[in-house]
Amino acid sequence: MTAKETIGVVGAGRMGQAMTRHLIRHGYAVLAQDIEPKAVEAARALGAAVAAAPAAVGKACAFVIVAVGYDDEAEAVMLGQGGLLETMGAGSIIGVSSTCTPEHVRMLAEKARAKGVEVLDAPICRGQRAADDGTMLTLCGGKPAVFERAKPVYGTFSKDIVLLGDIGAGQVGKAMNNFLLWVNGIALIEAGRLCEANGMDLVKLREALLISSGASDALKNWENVSFLWALKDMQIVAKMADKVGLSMPIAGAIKELVKDGRRIKTTNPPDWTGHGGRAKH
């Protein structure tokens, strides 16, 4: 792949804009598309060309990153009227960096393969700070050859890129990552409340926990744990468990608790950092 290849980015929201910025900084041209005019203008301001519909992106690009939100959005931009698969040529690649259920991304891959287009299941982790810094983790599922072709592209905004298995494996990995994040996030709210009730200095305790077995990424980056998408994440975990008939009582409890966790985090969270504890985004 040449450094000047045009990469399509469908979904120019918060993450898509970060991807666009890093891709351009590394010498790629970017053709971006979004249904929101403000997102389109933001992509244009970063130096991207813009398109009116996903099909226009697919016609111009042999590699497209789908950076919209969840199942329905990913399906719409790939399979809907004016979608990518109307125009993408055989041998092209779509990197699905949306957060989908594994079976949904497998369905999308089957539809793409029928037109000679390959899919890389490629959800991203580590949040908005990592997106800004270009240090995201991309968890992948797909053919090794497709993964190798995608690595230079995803390497512009990812510090680590891991192939976990076939299509769907990336989404399973992302779901488990997020499940464990929210387990820790809820535990930090409860532990913080208990410590405050006992007169503890949470900032000092946090410093000690971060060098002990109580450490977690959620504790390390507490200010950036927003719970914004936590319910969606846990609904995906629950759907996966239901599909295979697996009892996951902890996951079920966390799915309910994150609803209150989002409210607490935006109003009066435990102040683990000494800066109020509210998420910055």
Image (cartoon, rainbow, N blue to C red):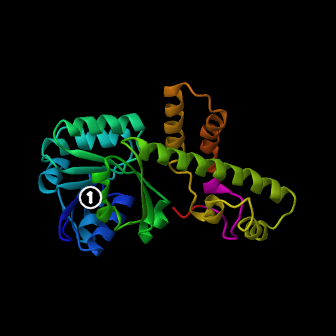
Q: Residues within 10 Å of mark 1 (few under 14, many from 20)?
A: some
Across and down, in percent, residue 261 comes to 63, 48
Residue extending farthest to the right is: 198
Q: Which residue is painted at 48% across and 48% down in the image?
A: 174
Residue stretch rendered in magenta on the structure: 264-278
Residues 141 and 15: in front is 141
Q: Which residue is painted at 31% across and 43% down in the image?
A: 74
Q: Classify residue 206 as left or right of residue 36.
A: right
Residue extending farthest to the front is: 144
Residues 174 and 68: in front is 174
Q: Is residue 277 magenta?
A: yes
Residue wearing tag 1 = 149
Is 236 situated above or below 99? above
Across and down, in percent, residue 92 comes to 18, 50
Q: Determine the main secondary structure of the stretch shown in magenta.
A: loop
Q: Which residue is painted at 56% across and 56% down in the image?
A: 226
Q: Is residue 60 magenta?
A: no
Residue 83 seen in this snapshot: no
Q: Classify residue 55 as left or right of residue 264.
A: left
Is 114 situated above or below 183? above
Q: Which residue is painted at 44% across and 71% down in the image?
A: 133
Can you say which quadrant of the picture contains the N terminus? bottom left
Across and down, in percent, residue 271 comes to 71, 64
- Disc 1 secondary structure class: helix
Is 132 situated above or below 161? below
Residue 47 seen in this snapshot: yes
